[in-house]
Image (tube, helix red, strand yellow):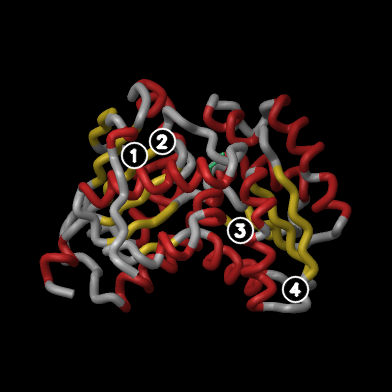
Amino acid sequence: MCENAARRPIGVFDSGLGGLTAVRELRRLLPCEDIVYFGDTGRVPYGTRSPSTIVEYAKQDIAFLLSKRVKAVIAACGTVSSTLPAHVSSNLPVPYMGVVESAAEAAVLATHTGRIGVIGTPATVSSGSYPAAIRKLSPSARITATACPLFVPLVENGYFDEHNPVTRLVAQDYLKDVKAAGVDTLILGCTHYPLIAPIISSVMGPDVTLIDVGRAAAQRARRMLERAGLLGPEGRGSVEYYVSDSTEQFDRLAHIFLGEYAGGSVQRIEIDSYTLTLAAP
Ligand code: DGL
């Protein structure tokens, strides 16, 4: 790859603001990189939609990022990562990665008992993507997966305070099966979930390791860029944010997802006007 390609930004997208948890980790690990983030806030959630709709939306999201001349695309979304077919992801003009494989790796490394739980959106859980990725690495793993459809709207609406009684009640109900299965490691299979990790942790108990898929993906992204000769030059990286609905919600909530890495301009775009053209296979 030529030097110019390494200078381009990394493209990151999610159905909404959840992918910002991956941006936070990328900023921490790769502070020199420029990032373009797209959150499809006008069409969130994806996780309760059909696979064909999710793929159609994801292709537009990727087309937008490519229009920004990104050097790599990261789907910071468990739902897209579980749904986008290989014939799309492997025919993009730049390297692509999702969050599933890196989270499976982290979970297999973390577990002592081989009992791993996965929570995610309905689309993610019904795709079976995380169990398949875990079994590739550890065929004897015992996996319990549960869909948690209300977690994303709760997070997007700001119900993530550790003591929020509504979210706590919902979590107690959703986490019954993974708790009963005695897992020692739980993949938070959706990038929105780290925001409610304290609630999930207090329901699961202190001995259960939670895997943050955004963090695991950021670590893998660094390796991917390094291997492709695409790590950016020294400097202070910047982030541009784009959303498909009003920027108000972003202004209100983004700092909570980004923590100390908050800051950067946000603009609204018309995502419907982007079409993905794939490279010939
Ligand atoms: N952040 C998402 C994920 O990781 C999206 C949730 C949704 O849009 O339903 O799955």
User: Residue reaching furthest front?
Assistant: 280
Which of discs 3 and 2 lies nearer the camera? The answer is: 2
Label 1 vs label 2, nearer the camera: 2
* Sooner in the amino-acid sequence: mark 3 or mark 4: 4
- The local crowd at label 2, few if under 14, some if 14 to 19, many if 20 or more residues have their Cα within 10 Å, is many
Give, as a three-letter code, the residue at label 4: His
Q: Residue under circle 1?
A: 262
Task: Please give the residue where the numbered disc 2 appears in the rendered image.
Answer: 40
Q: Position of residue 43 (x, y in %)?
A: 46, 31
**Residue at the spot of label 4:** 112
Q: Secondary structure at mark 3?
A: strand
Residue at the disc numbered 3: 211
Q: Are marks 3 and 1 in contact (CB under 8 Å)?
A: no
- Residue at 49%, 33% in the rendered image: 44
Disc 1 + disc 2, Cβ < 8 Å: no
Amino acid under disc 3? Ile
Mark 2: which secondary structure?
loop
* Residue 190 appears left or right of 86: right
Give above or below for 257 relative to 188: above
Q: Label 4: how many residues lie within 10 Å, few (<14), some (14-19) or many (20+)?
A: few
The first of marks 3 and 2 along the sequence is 2
Q: Residue furthest right?
A: 180
